[in-house]
Image (cartoon, rainbow, N blue to C red):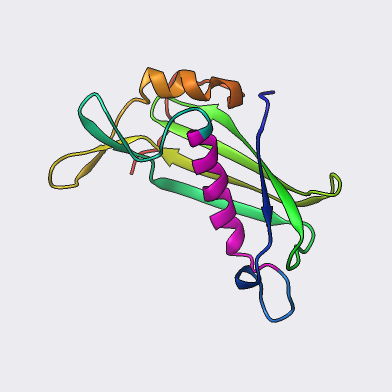
Amino acid sequence: MAEPFILRRRAEFSDTDMAGIVHFAQFFKYMEAAEHAMFRAVGLSIVTEIAGEHVGWPRVHAECDYRSPLRFEEEFDIHAHVQQRRTRSLVLKFHFTRAAGDETIATGSLTTVCVAQDAQRKMRAVAIPSMVGEALAPYTAAVADRDTADSP
């Protein structure tokens, strides 16, 4: 198992519903924030130029399972890691816990595809650049030889 990247957050008022509970959709924003922070932690960005190509990571699948309410002003940790690195895609896993313990709040995942864009902004799936795979290696649990069907 890879070591997780951990991002600590606090539930903001704007994240909550009228009952003071974080709205379910916010967890997808939290996962994306953790993904961006993990990339930055290894010197990368999810939108960059590599070898003269504009490279990005659109999502092709997202899910989240909720276990316990997260409330306004609670601190929580987002544990993120690359569950699987395929030829052209990453499966990112997230585990949300309260900062004051290890109680699970939610779990989720994002599947992203590495794409290059041409001058007309048309995307095509490309192999993950080796420098990206190497940089994310500390947070990567498994590397697969090929993709199953993850293309935009």
Q: Is residue 56 left or right of residue 24?
A: left
Q: Is residue 66 left or right of residue 146?
A: right
* 117 magenta-colored: no
Towards the viewer: 119 or 59 = 119
Which x, y percent locates residue 137?
Answer: 54, 20
* 31 magenta-colored: yes
Which x, y percent locates residue 85?
Answer: 50, 26
Q: Name the residue rendered at 52%, 49% in the picture.
A: 32
Where does the magenta region start and end?
Answer: 22-40
95 to 67, vertically: above or below:
above
Which x, y percent locates residue 71?
Answer: 76, 66
Q: Is residue 94 left or right of residue 88?
A: right
For the stretch drawn in magenta, the main secondary structure is helix
94 to 64, vertically: above or below:
above
Q: Name the residue rendered at 54%, 36% in the picture.
A: 38
Towards the viewer: 92 or 132 = 132
Residue found at the very far left of the displayed protein: 119
110 to 145, vertically: above or below:
below
Which x, y percent locates residue 23?
Answer: 64, 69
Q: Quadrant of residue 75?
A: bottom right
